[in-house]
Amino acid sequence: MRFFPRAGLTLLGALCLDAHPPAGTPSNAAPTNDEIGYVALLPCTGACEASSSAPRTANILLDRQTGQTIPMTADAWSPDGMKRLMGGVDILVLPVLDNTSVNLTNHPAHYWTPAWSPDGSLIAFASDRDGSRSLYTMKADGSDLLRLDTGIAAVSQPTWAPDSTRLAFTCNFEPQNVSPSEICVTNVDGSGFARLTEGRDPDWSPDGTRIVFTTERYGGSQLAFVNPDGSDVTRVVPGWQAYGARWAPDGTQIAFVSILDPDDFWSTSLDIMSVDGTFLGSLGAGFSPVWRPGRRPTLRPVASFTFSCSGFTCTFDASGSSDSDGSVITYAWQFWDGDASGAQVTHTFTATHGTLLIVMDNDGSWNASSVNVDQAPILSFTTSCTGLSCTFDASASFDPDGSIAWFIWRFGDSIDGVRPARTTHAYSAPGTYTVTLTASDQDGVTSVFSQTVAVVNVPPVASFVSTCDGLTCTFNASSSIDVDGTIASYAWNFGDTTVGTGVSLSHAYTKGGTYRVALRVTDGSGATGSQEQVLTVVPADMHIGDLDRQTTNQGNAWIATVSISVHDTGHNVIGNVVVTGSWTDGSATSCITNALGQCTASIRLARKATSISFQVQSVLAAGLTYKPASNHDPDGDSNGTSITVTR
Ligand SMILES: [Ca+2]
Ligand SMILES: [Ca+2]
Ligand SMILES: [Ca+2]
Ligand SMILES: [Ca+2]
């Protein structure tokens, strides 16, 4: 749930509210309250998406006037804004832009919430170096360590009065936070200890009149003010769920963490308000605000650099950076995979190539410039076409400082796709095409390369086979090929003035003979190929399939009868065939076969004749050839050509 609508408020909108420089100062002079560091919650990508409880975080320093952010971690700043403090296993002091730290404590323990006194002389902090979490001060060089509290179970978050004589802090009088925490104060010499009121996380106003803190007395977690003597506790904005308030250096604004969803620790917004509680805007999801103090209205430097790369090694030169009212004193480089300092640096990258230059002038003003020096892939490809089918090979392409992650091929005929370096493509029609190759390296840096390819169709090759059964022939042209496409049509001329279409078909000739059969095939691009073959068509055979004999007595005479069966090549009976034969007495006879392929020849003989033979002389039928050599008799009473009838 969200307690207050954020409609219309954006980061930039909030920045505009105090972006006006004081009268009489240069237009690009840094105003007060312009720099704030915090832990930003970043949109989650990759592995952290698996866990909603742990978003990606980044410690950044935001320039509210320019909107620039640079990576920077600081728990607190020196009063002049030129050094950073960081707690942890020791207290470290670091310059603004590099991480060459000086260890102020050198004692194995935990150190929390260091705070530099406004006069620059002391650093207060909480530590368990003596057991319980106690309040300490030391000089800014780490000497003269002094433990201030006694009898308090736990201490944290010291904050200095502006005159550097007193400290307010969070105190607990029982371990494990059994009782509510309180705001306590003490003089820097350990005297004047007082318990002010229930609360935690105090921050003393720069003018010394008030302390802002977090309290639970109103329900939930809300912000309140209290006077340094413990009087006049008032809510900042009644009902607003928030914690972690920090005064801006000039005391006119307060940064704080708004609780957007009390059930989700990470659902926070880092917001700014004026001291009267007027909401000024949000910096986005985040927490742990730390203002950078000590800013002076001087002109910002200009960050500028050139670079040149050879493979993974790049040389950078920032000597063109400048500061018109002072001088650039620090050059800090932040690479994706390391840091460097100095006006000229050489860096050998291991992978991606994001580079950020931050320059700071003698007043502590900074500016930044970033560039991705990742080099784009260098592309080329060869083309080899067989008719409409082309092979493209971009395997000679390379990335000078990485590797190519993917290729997109555009073949110029509206067919595109992510494909490997070597790919083939079949065009549907001949022509000249512009082939465009796009490639990206592993960091998303892309290149584009195009060249034209002339695609010429290869005509199809016609080929066919034929088989004939008598006058009926079948033709098959499936052996025809088109190497770069497909055959669209088959046209036949059978050589007897008739034509046909189709890859395979049959045709019945009306008579035997020699015919010139022509096939013409056409591919999808209209190119043709032809083949002609001479075809000899032979009518089907016929032969005698059986001779049978029969005798009939007629007084002193008898009748010899021969039954004749005529078959074709396939041993099918054939009707309407004229069979002519001769008897051994010299007489001739003929008959015409019926639908069963049979006819009979008879002769009347005197009784004294004991036998007579019949011999087939000719067999005649339209379109069929008599083939005597095929004559046969299945029951063996003849040789198929002649038969003897015995009385
Ligand atoms: Ca300057
Ligand atoms: Ca690259
Ligand atoms: Ca073709
Ligand atoms: Ca027979």
Image (cartoon, rainbow, N blue to C red):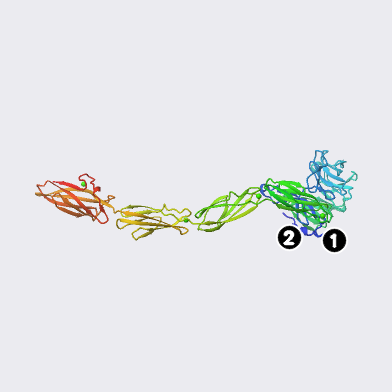
Q: Is mark 1 within 8 Å of ligand 1?
A: no
Q: Position of residue 531 (x, y in %)?
A: 39, 55
Residue behind mark 1: 24
Residue density around tag 2, few if under 14, some if 14–19, many if 20 or more, within 10 Å: few
Task: Return the mark for residue 236.
Answer: none
Tell which tag, 1 or 2, sits nearer the viewer.
1
Q: Position of residue 94 (x, y in %)?
A: 80, 46
User: Does 415 sit left or right of 5 as displayed?
Assistant: left
As displayed, is residue 23 above or below residue 96? below
Residue density around tag 1, few if under 14, some if 14–19, many if 20 or more, within 10 Å: few
Look at the image and tell me in which quarter the N terminus lies. bottom right
Q: Nearer the viewer, residue 188 or 467?
A: 467
Kind of residue sitting beneath label 1: Gly
Q: Position of residue 549 (x, y in %)?
A: 18, 48
Kind of residue sitting beneath label 2: Gly
Q: Nearer the viewer, residue 255 or 229?
A: 255
Res. 216 visible in picture: no
Q: Position of residue 177 (x, y in %)?
A: 80, 43
Q: Nearer the viewer, residue 304 or 558?
A: 304
Residue behind mark 2: 8
Q: CA distance from mark 1 to mark 2?
A: 32 Å
User: Does 368 sit left or right of 194 as displayed?
Assistant: left
Disc on the earlier residue, 1 or 2: 2
Q: Secondary structure at mark 1?
A: loop
Q: Secondary structure at mark 2?
A: loop
Q: Residue at x 35, y 60 (%)?
A: 498
Res. 587 visible in picture: yes
User: Does 191 sit left or right of 309 as displayed?
Assistant: right
Instruction: Count the marks.
Output: 2
Where residue 298 sits, quadrant-wise, is: bottom right
